[in-house]
Amino acid sequence: MKEMTVRVSRFDPENDTEPHFETYTVSVHEGARVLHVLHVIHDTLDPTLSYRYCCEAGQCGSCSLRVNGEPVLACMQEAKDGMTIEPLNLPVVRDLTVEMEDVLARLAPFPAREEAGLPTKEEIEAMKPLRDCIECLSCVSECPAVDVASFLGPTAMCQEMRIALDPRADQNRIRNAIEEGLFTCTTCQRCRDVCPKNIEIPGKAIEKLREIANRQGLTLPRHQDVARLVEDTGRSVDRTKPTFLEQVPEVIEPDGPVRGEVGFFVGCMYNGRLPETALDMIEVMKRNGIRLIIPHDQVCCGSPLIRTGQTRILPALKKRNIEAFTRRGITTVMTMCAGCGSTLKNDYDTPYTIKDVTEILTEYGIEPPAALDIRATYHDPCHLLRGQGISREPRELLKTVVREFVEMPSRCCGAGGGVRSGLPDQAAALGRQRDDEIKKTHADVVVTVCPFCEFHIADSTDRPVKNICTLLLEGYREKDRKKGVKKESE
Ligand code: SF4
Ligand code: SF4
Ligand code: FES
């Protein structure tokens, strides 16, 4: 047996105006689960503690709650000394019990077809990734779109896609899925991360439902405009000024000895909308001995099309991008846009390695810049943090160039999944939430590594928003300035 002390959120709607924490010390056996701890508290210390459970085997979904801020199944999660136990981010009924009925009662019932045959082996395989949902609502409780839009949530999308794939179902429910909020999802992938059954809801349900919507002519008009632009120009952003690719040669040599060589996949946003940021990156690479090869025949990676379900021309884009880099014998391709990087890593089958700019810079190691006299916070782009699993590298780089670094919670800014273009009011609402978090940090500058986040957060806050490469370049310029001042005074 071992002793542990835990904090548990308590709320009695008849007497409390808001939840508070109580601390309990209990004795449990080695390997005890969170649910065992709750049983001991309930049975020996406080019989009024309210929590749900049923199967105690990870199958019914009723015991979901948060441990140290992350959704888990209490019956599957190992208990740890010092843990904090809270309800899911849903309306609290009492203590750890939340309102689930609201969502569960609105999930589509299975509309069985009369005289339907059994599904084939292939159809069963296709349904498999979605069949495991236990309706624990962990995903709904963490979904940023549910917070600000009329969206029934990821569980409902999972169910709609399962029905769409089942030949025994009697209904084309795509209009229902749209009414339930299909286009409000920002594809942030938070639901996938917290799902105890590892269901890839954005990729396997939401994007697939959007593909069905597209085949039925139900794609949002603004998304259709983007698809037309890609088809006509190879780019998802229209040309309003000289593009990045028009301003640079195909090969950029470093200032000093060559320490490495990478291909650069620029992406539509840096090419057309924020070329100055990509030009800053070039200066950082030159300073750190990395040769850049930049094929001018590269095109849009297709991310805006995949996220919005418009995949018809995707194979052609993939072919052009793969050939553009292989033709030049490039073995490592660097991205600077989190969305492009995530797409090339997860939706392509490339014969070369894909790395984010922050991976390249930390792997090679950089000349230390001067530390700027600023307090900075960092926004995790969803497609970098969850799409590529990268969080350490940008923080390491950032800490080299600022006086003070302060964290803020990782949450979607609202720019992704076609939401900024298709549903701008929803994107703005999520942007305002980001601004609230930014203000709490009292940071002078917000740093990120994604042009969509850069652009959208800049619209949502009065603080400057900068790419990590721009900040590193400022650090190098400050270093040079200080050296110059020192030389002059000698
Ligand atoms: S990807 Fe993000 S926005 Fe979309 S359903 Fe999942 S949590 Fe919600
Ligand atoms: S999709 Fe996953 S997280 Fe969401 S309700 Fe189903 S099992 Fe729970
Ligand atoms: S009690 Fe059923 S999943 Fe935990």
Image (cartoon, rainbow, N blue to C red):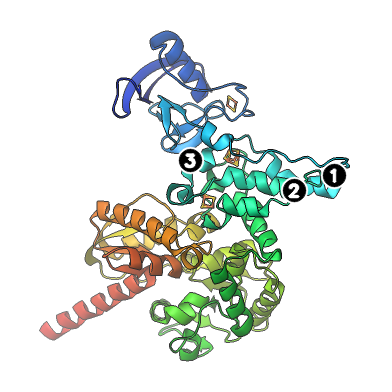
Q: What residue type is labelled 3?
A: Ser
Q: Which of marks 1 and 2 is in front?
A: 2
Residue under label 3, please give it: 141
Q: Is residue 198 visible?
A: yes
Q: Give percent across and percent down for residue 128.
A: 74, 44
Furthest-left residue in view? 489
Label located before the other in sequence (3 or 2): 3
Determine the residue positioned at 71% across, 46% down. 162
Q: Which circle's residue, 1 or 2, is located before the other in the chain?
A: 1
User: Which residue in the protein does label 2 denote?
Assistant: 171
| 92 and 256: which is toward the camera | 92
Quadrant of picture, ligand 3: top right
Residue at 70% in and 40% down: 131
Q: In this view, does 216 lie to the left or right of 222?
A: right
Structural distance between the alpha carbons of marks 1 and 2? 16 Å
The answer to whether 348 is drawn above or below residue 158 in the figure is below
- Indicate the quadrant where residue 262 lies: bottom right
User: Would residue 410 be found to the left or right of residue 71 on screen?
Assistant: left
